[in-house]
């Protein structure tokens, strides 16, 4: 079986690493399975791309489509045009896409139109919020996917509701958590740790990059100003996404508690999360990692496509206003962390399950 694996953006790299490891293990066992790795070039910044390949031992891509930035349509179209050529030159039995970025949807469409089967890892999750491009990517991808691999029973139920064939829906667990377990012994302290006087539990991690939170400079500054004053005795460590950085550079506001650092590599970032007091974020992936690490997470969105991070895990959806964040955070400071657990099958073995299932699909 020949599989083409697609990766385009930071969270994709983290998700494909354990899938490739599982695939290589099966090759070593003598199974007839091979892969070609295609990087679409959606994220090309070293901090968002190369670092992850190096740290997670992901092989050098066989092809890089180098599409880079653009509007939603420009980027999606550029990926489709380049991937169609790539797939015609290098046909395969199956295209495997992960997550919900433009590369996921664009390559799924191209594959399907070339009569190639599509597997979607992290299928079926839904926020119901069509103002987020990721939700549209999820819906379109799942509407043409052949093999669905889900992280939760609720994602599987969503797919059944939309009429997907139950025989092709496989609840396997979470590949992002596979990566976490595979690397937890390798996490490493960042260079600035001492200089910034960081210590276990004396800082909060902040990440923000969703258009709704960061695209308007005055509301971004207002939100950051509030977060800067959220607690007196904790630093706020903000690995700032290039998109957020570009918008914030329009303002000269200074912050007293926020420490701005570059986007972190995986091993440093996981070290920072594991040792933090709490996390404030608008990332979906981070709410899964904090759930497994038992770190309180406050998500600055009105909804989530990962409800188990809130019903079982450490996540609390606080909405996008600072007033709500403050209310929820104050209650956490007063009452302590809510009870939490780890969702079913988030056990580090999702990728092995995926490859075993695919081998049986022949
Ligand atoms: N991440 C990282 N360094 C950072 C910020 C995030 O390694 O400075 C990792 C994080 O641990 C998670 C993934 O990137 O695994 C989430 O990526 P992102 O927030 O871009 O995507 P989303 O979760 O919003 O889809």
Image (tube, grey):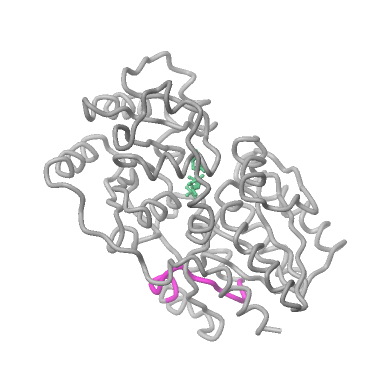
Pick the residue in front: 351 or 5.
351
Quarter of the image where the N terminus is located? bottom right
Q: Residue at x 49, y 51 (%)?
A: 185
Pick the residue in front: 175 or 347.
347
- Confirm whether the magenta stretch covers residue 152: yes
Please state the horizontal and vertical placement of residue 143, each as a whole percent of the image. Answer: 56, 70
Q: Residue at x 73, y 53 (%)?
A: 59
- State how many labels appear: 0
Asked whether, in this view, residue 69 is left or right of residue 153, the answer is right
Please state the horizontal and vertical placement of residue 267, each as a whole percent of the image. Answer: 52, 43
Dividing the picture into quadrants, the one containing residue 42 is top right
Q: Is residue 261 above or below residue 331?
A: above
Q: Residue at x 72, y 47 (%)?
A: 78
Quarter of the image where the C terminus is located? bottom right
- Confirm whether the magenta stretch covers residue 351: no
Please state the horizontal and vertical placement of residue 123, each as a whole percent of the image. Answer: 52, 67
Q: Is residue 349 above or below residue 6?
A: below
Q: Is residue 242 above or below residue 265?
A: above
- The span shown in magenta is 145-156
Please state the horizontal and vertical placement of residue 236, each as a whole percent of the image. Answer: 34, 29
In this view, which residue lies farthest toward the right? 89
In this view, which residue lies farthest toward the front? 185
Q: Residue at x 51, y 28 (%)?
A: 191
């Amino acid at each position: 079986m020949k599989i083409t694996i697609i990766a385009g953006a930071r969270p994709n790299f983290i998700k494909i690493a354990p899938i490739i490891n599982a695939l290589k293990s099966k090759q070593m066992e003598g199974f007839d399975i091979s892969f070609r790795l295609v990087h679409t070039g959606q994220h090309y910044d070293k901090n968002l791309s190369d670092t992850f390949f190096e740290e997670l031992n992901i092989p050098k891509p066989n092809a890089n489509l180098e599409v880079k930035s653009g509007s939603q349509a420009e980027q999606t179209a550029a990926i489709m045009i380049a991937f169609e050529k790539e797939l015609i030159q290098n046909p395969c039995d199956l295209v495997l896409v992960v997550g919900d970025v433009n590369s996921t949807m664009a390559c799924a469409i191209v594959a399907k139109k070339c009569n190639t089967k599509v597997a979607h890892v992290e299928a079926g999750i839904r926020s119901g919020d069509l103002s987020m491009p990721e939700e549209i990517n999820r819906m379109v991808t799942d509407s043409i996917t052949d093999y669905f691999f889900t992280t939760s029973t609720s994602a599987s139920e969503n797919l059944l509701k939309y009429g997907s064939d139950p025989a092709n829906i496989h609840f396997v667990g979470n590949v992002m958590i596979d990566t976490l377990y595979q690397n937890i012994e390798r996490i490493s302290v960042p260079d600035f740790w001492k200089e910034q006087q960081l210590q276990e539990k004396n800082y909060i991690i902040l990440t923000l990059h969703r258009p709704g939170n960061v695209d308007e400079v005055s509301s971004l500054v207002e939100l950051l100003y509030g977060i800067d004053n959220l607690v007196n005795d904790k630093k706020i460590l903000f690995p700032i996404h290039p998109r957020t950085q570009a918008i914030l550079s329009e303002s000269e506001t200074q912050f007293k508690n926020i420490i701005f650092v570059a986007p972190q590599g995986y091993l440093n970032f996981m070290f920072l999360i594991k040792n933090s007091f709490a996390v404030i974020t608008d990332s979906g992936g981070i709410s899964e990692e904090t759930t497994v690490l038992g770190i309180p997470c406050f998500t600055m969105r009105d909804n989530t496509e990962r409800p188990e991070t809130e019903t079982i895990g450490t996540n609390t959806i606080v909405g996008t206003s600072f007033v709500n964040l403050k209310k929820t955070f104050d209650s956490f400071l007063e009452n302590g962390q809510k009870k939490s657990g780890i969702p079913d099958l988030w056990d580090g073995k999702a990728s092995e399950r995926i490859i075993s299932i695919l081998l049986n699909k022949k």
